[in-house]
Amino acid sequence: MAIRKLPLSSLVVNRANDRHGELENETAAIAWLFNEREQHMRNLAKDIVEKGEIYEYPLVAPEKTKFIVFDGNRRVTCLKLLDDPRRAPTGELQTFFHEQRGLWRGTFPKEISCQVETDRDRIDEILFRRHTGTQNGVGQSTWDDRMKSTFVTRTGKGGGPSVADEIEKRLADANLLPSRRKIPRSTLNRLLSAEPFRQRVGISMKGGRFEFTHDETTSLAALARIANDLASRNVVLGDIWDVDGKREYLNKLEDEGLLPDPAQAITKDDGPKLKTKPSKVKPSARAIPTIRTTLIPQKEFGLSWPGRLQRHHQIWEELQFHLNLRTHPNAVSVLLRVLLELALENYIKEAGVAVYDNDKLATRLEKAGLHLQAAGKIDIKQMDVIRKFKQGDKLVSADTLNKYVHSPNFAPSPEHLMSMWDSLADVVVQLLEA
């Protein structure tokens, strides 16, 4: 494999691209891409203009004095039309590419780096692995929805609006932008890549819409501090690369009193509503009641998962998505016991709760609960559940969990397991968030 910089003018869009089979010439190949994928091509062109580069080398092979593109035809086409908009297949597209070229920052590239291969069999082997599926592990493995979600959570690169753009607009309106340097948007997007982190600074991007969740003045002050830290390079990408780094930085701001507190949360009030007699609605024949099939309800709990909690995360997902509560109650009961203990040990370690080696589970949970209550993270009712956890005659108790694991005569029921989870859920989430 050789990576070479080649003149854009020497690259030829493949008229025999496997997307469409053989066509008459390069012009016909370009026209096909827009006939079949016009919106995708427009979006790609905008992205190339915005970023000022392409992120993967086109795969090319020499053909006389030119180079035929075997992979990357869409990218090369966009670059060619940005270079010469007159080559676009319609007047409307010519106008579009002319406008996009006007948005290009700096010098437009006349050369691009390409992967040059002279062996066509080798090219076919590369294409086979890239574009024909996983091939039992031989080919490129595509991401499922959960993998994509993990990537978005880690990086903030979702399909919706950029949180960095939205924040910059608000700071500009409030005259709070850094005075000398620009905010590194990719770093800001990574820091606030998930709702739990956004909520801590008093904002939300649920449903792709920016809104303040806490007092706007306090939240803007926190965002201004973050913007200044990033713009001045006091905080760089490496500092907030992972979940622990993001938490550490936000905890520092919280310790300095810069983040909004729970008392500043905005409550939505739609105003007084007229009392009206409810009209009788005939039930829809298509309405299907929701039946809970897993121990942990399949909803968002706002958890962020650092790498050190890999096993905790795996157990959580098994209990939330994979293990049916009615067909696997024994497995569910044992994993619930394991999850609680692992989450508890995580909190004790990260929060520095003082415990003794010979403290039993219920005692350790009570000590952690008192620590959580003192920090304002759980209320009196939740603390009462924890205290009752020490009592062996209660359903939600350490004794019950131990019997799930050790007793040959104690059969867990789905209803009891759901009741136990619902009682402990808020506490478990707090234990994992340490």
Image (spheres, grey):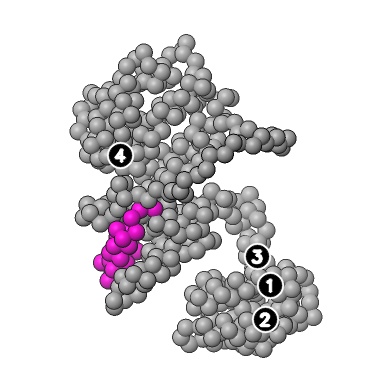
Disc 3 is placed on an element classified as helix
Give the farthest residue toward the top. 409
Q: Does the magenta portion include 82?
A: no
Disc 1 is placed on an element classified as helix
Q: Amino acid at mark 1?
A: Glu
- The reply to whether the C-beta atoms of the residues labelled 1 and 2 are less than 8 Å apart is yes
Query: Bounds of the magenta span?
Result: 213-239
Compared across the picture, whether 160 is left or right of 81 comes to left
Q: Dot 4, crowdedness within 10 Å: few (<14), some or many (≥20)?
A: some
Query: Which quadrant is the N terminus positioned in?
Result: bottom right
Q: Which residue is mark 4?
A: 377
Q: Amino acid at mark 3?
A: Leu
Does 240 sit above or below residue 420?
below
Q: Earlier in the sequence, mark 2 or mark 4?
A: 2
Q: Position of residue 216 (x, y in %)?
A: 34, 59
Q: Dot 2, crowdedness within 10 Å: few (<14), some or many (≥20)?
A: some
Q: Earlier in the sequence, mark 3 or mark 4?
A: 3
Residue found 41% across the figure and 69% down from its top: 169
- Whether residue 416 is visible: yes
Q: Which residue is mark 2?
A: 93
Q: Position of residue 388 (x, y in %)?
A: 32, 21
Q: Dot 3, crowdedness within 10 Å: few (<14), some or many (≥20)?
A: some
Q: Which residue is mark 3?
A: 127
Q: Earlier in the sequence, mark 3 or mark 1?
A: 1
Q: Quadrant of residue 334?
A: top left
Q: Which residue is mark 1?
A: 38
Q: Mark 3 or 1, which is nearer the eye?
A: 1
- The reply to whether the C-beta atoms of the residues labelled 2 and 3 are less than 8 Å apart is no
Provide the major secondary structure of the magenta segment: helix
- The reply to whether the C-beta atoms of the residues labelled 2 and 4 are less than 8 Å apart is no
Q: Amino acid at mark 2?
A: Leu
